[in-house]
Image: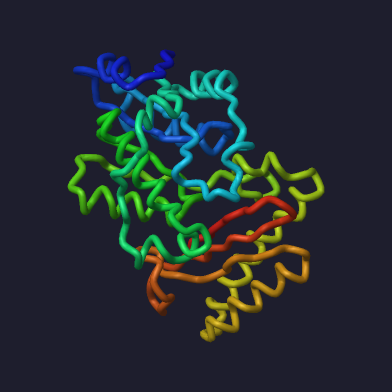
Amino acid sequence: MQIHHDIPALRAALQGRGPIAFVPTMGNLHDGHLALVRQARAAVGPQGLVVASIFVNRLQFAPHEDFDRYPRTLARDAELLDGAGCDWVFAPDEAAMYPEPQGYKVHPPAELADILEGHFRPGFFVGVCTVVAKLFNIVQPQVAVFGKKDYQQLMVIRRMVAQMALPIEILAGETERSPQGLALSSRNGYLSETQKQQALLLSRTLKQLIARWQAGERDLAVLEEDAMQALRHAGWQPDYVTLRRQHDLGEARDGEPLVALGAARLGATRLIDNLEA
């Protein structure tokens, strides 16, 4: 497996190669990331090229968030990617990705990007879209794989690719979970063993929200507030627990595929999860 750190070298190596499947990450990898790599390999076959990026993108972190303490584990990540069937890793530093202040940025539409995660993390999806667009331009993949764990991010990227007419197929990877049901996340490493057990409450709360809707309850404000209160009573600090349409995250309606989404802080760690219904 090759590791590239600068853009010109990667572009030169990619010249004439293909098809390319791309998996962008911020590193500190877990089995969820590796499942995306295996999905990328299946998409392009043994003759294709699987490229993963590892870059902790400052643009998507607010000043009070965990950019400086986000784990950087390149050597370990490279070993895991190699074992999962990745061919090349692109691991630039900030000077390579942002040699000058990034004045040109991609601003996704407010109706999708300023709700839920975008409401509680202003500017987050501007940072995500900007770095992903830049990575797409560098790697020039035919396929890119994003996990459903970051459900809203997946939808924002899909909309960006469609509206910008980028010749890239976006594949969605299912959320990988621990045997107990905890959605795998790089930030789970911040949790104590006790907190990892407590963290299971988030997915259970989402399941209960879906179950009540499917049982015929239709006052979403009540359903969502009850879900938030269940987390608060257990010592969490929830940002949102909601039920939305899968295709655009609009208001839930009968007869349409839905998704329950939640974000809450357990101790100092903010966790997100979602369940399709």
Residue drawn at point x = 30 percent, y = 49 percent: 106
Q: Is residue 17 left or right of residue 81?
A: left
Observer-nearest of 210 and 33 = 33
**Is residue 35 visible to us here?**
no
- The structure's colour scheme is rainbow
Is 210 drawn above or below residue 47 in the view shown?
Answer: below
Is 204 drawn above or below residue 23 in the view shown?
Answer: below
Count of numbered tags: 0
Q: Position of residue 26 (x, y in %)?
A: 50, 35
Is 216 drawn above or below residue 48 in the view shown?
Answer: below
Q: Quadrant of residue 176?
A: top right
Q: Is residue 199 left or right of residue 49?
A: right
**Is residue 79 visible to us here?**
yes
Q: Position of residue 29 (x, y in %)?
A: 56, 32
Q: Position of residue 53 (x, y in %)?
A: 42, 29
Is the N terminus in the top left, top right, bottom left or bottom right quadrant?
A: top left
Observer-nearest of 241 and 47 = 241
Q: Residue furthest right?
A: 194
Residue drawn at point x = 51 percent, y = 32 percent: 34
Residue drawn at point x = 54 percent, y = 58 percent: 274
Is 98 drawn above or below residue 202 in the view shown?
Answer: above
Residue drawn at point x = 70 percent, y = 48 percent: 180
Observer-nearest of 106 and 178 = 106
Q: Position of residue 268 (x, y in %)?
A: 71, 52
